[in-house]
Image: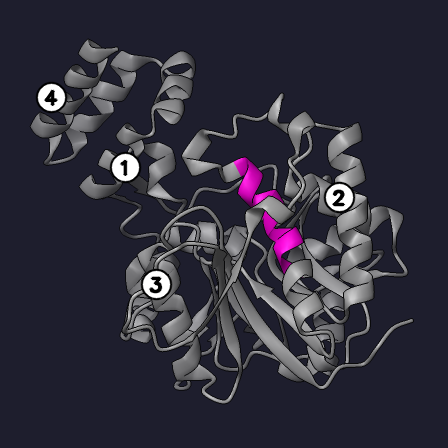
Amino acid sequence: MQITTKEIISLFIHLGGVPPKHLILNIERFLDLFPQRRVVLLLSEGTEVSNGTKFETAFVNESSFPSLEEMGKVHDFSFRNGFWKNTFLRLFAIEHFQKLNPNSGVLHIESDVILMPSFPWDFFKDSTKLNWLRVHDGADVAAILYSPNEFLISKLTRDLLSTAFAEPNTTDMSALFKFAVSHPGDHAYLPSLTSLSSQSENLEEFHAKVDSLLKGYFDPLAIGIWLFGQDPKNSYGVTRRYVHQTHHDLDPRSLELRMDQNGDVLDKQGLRIFSFHIHSKNVSLFGKNWKNEMASQLMEANLLEKEKSFNLVKFKEAMADRSLISHILINLNRLRFLRSLKKYRHVNSLTLMLKQFLKIR
């Protein structure tokens, strides 16, 4: 039985430790844009929260989640404080939260996803299916995931648990894709340029449809990565922009984006982009002056300027993650990496840190 809900609760989730700075800034930004909307940060039980927190928090006991033992035999659950495990378990955290709020729809927003001023709340209010975003054939993303009721989110988690046991090499992205394919009556993709590949329509038809319905679409991942770069922790503190992810359905190189006076971003067809996946975690895009920062970076992107930047703090964080370092040292040419560092002004301290690391190994 499906229920049409009236209230939509926006839910951010962080499992396993203190929430990062960009997440706190993102929630504060959310409240500035949508002060009448209820937003909750769900944390692992025992996580300390600042006394100055201006938003609602809730807690979940992780012992109530499945252990995912089979997945743990394939994935390194120690990587980045449990990254592979926590990204999967957050979907169970959504179910936990919705059971506590059975009469509300729940809109899950990833910590590095920002909503834009014209976000289409009424679209979700009328939705009776699970909604999320497609990345490419074989992978979906819960950057934005909407659950209209407890029945459907519980159906999803049962399917996820079955997949995790039968296919332990799965991830949250591949498991969501599998559910979407096998349960078309329970799921519908949110409009995005990457959803074209799963539908029998061309770009013109897509623009016509969203123009008549929403006047816009969502960014699963590719647009945000193209404009603002990947997380610099993935590349020793280096942020690289304008890199086309060839395994993604969307090629964003043809996009010509601009910001209007309200802070919304429009493409060359005049359609709005309702959300951006800020994979780089650039805190300036989450802070009080996000409009100025985004306008500046959009201008740079249209001219393909400032392609690379370096963040020493992110480099140190990457170096501290021994599992990440071990993986990179096995798969990359060390000399080539050291030479690449000469492009940056911190080369001396960087080289010293690398030598120290290699020495203690």
The mark that comes first in sequence, 3 or 2, is: 3
Q: Residue at x 74, y 66 (%)?
A: 206
Q: Indicate the amino acid at tag 2.
A: Leu
- Residue that mark 2 sits on: 160
* Residue at the bottom extreme of this rendering: 36
Q: Closer to us: mark 3 or mark 2?
A: 3
Residue where numbered disc 1 is placed: 317
Mark 2 neighbour class, 10 Å CA radius: few under 14, some 14 to 19, many 20 or more:
many
Circle number at residue 352: 4
Kindly indicate whether the residue at mark 1 contacts the one at mark 4 (C-beta within 8 angstroms).
no
**Which residue lies under the disc numbered 3?**
49
Task: State how far apart marks 2 and 4 are (Cα).
Answer: 45 Å
The amino acid type found where label 1 is placed reads Glu
The residue type indicated by label 4 comes to Leu
Place of residue 255 in the rendered image (x, y in percent of width and height, measured from the top left): 52, 60
Q: Is residue 94 above or below residue 88?
A: below
Describe residue 40's horizontal placement relative to residue 330 as left or right: right
Q: Point out the stretch of residues depicted in magenta.
A: 84-94
Q: Which of marks 3 and 4 precedes in the sequence? A: 3
Which class describes the residues within 10 Å of circle 3: few (<14), some (14-19), or many (20+)?
few
Q: Is residue 187 magenta?
A: no
- Label the magenta part by its dominant secondary structure: helix
Image coords of residue 215 (percent x, y): 64, 79
Q: Amino acid at mark 3?
A: Val
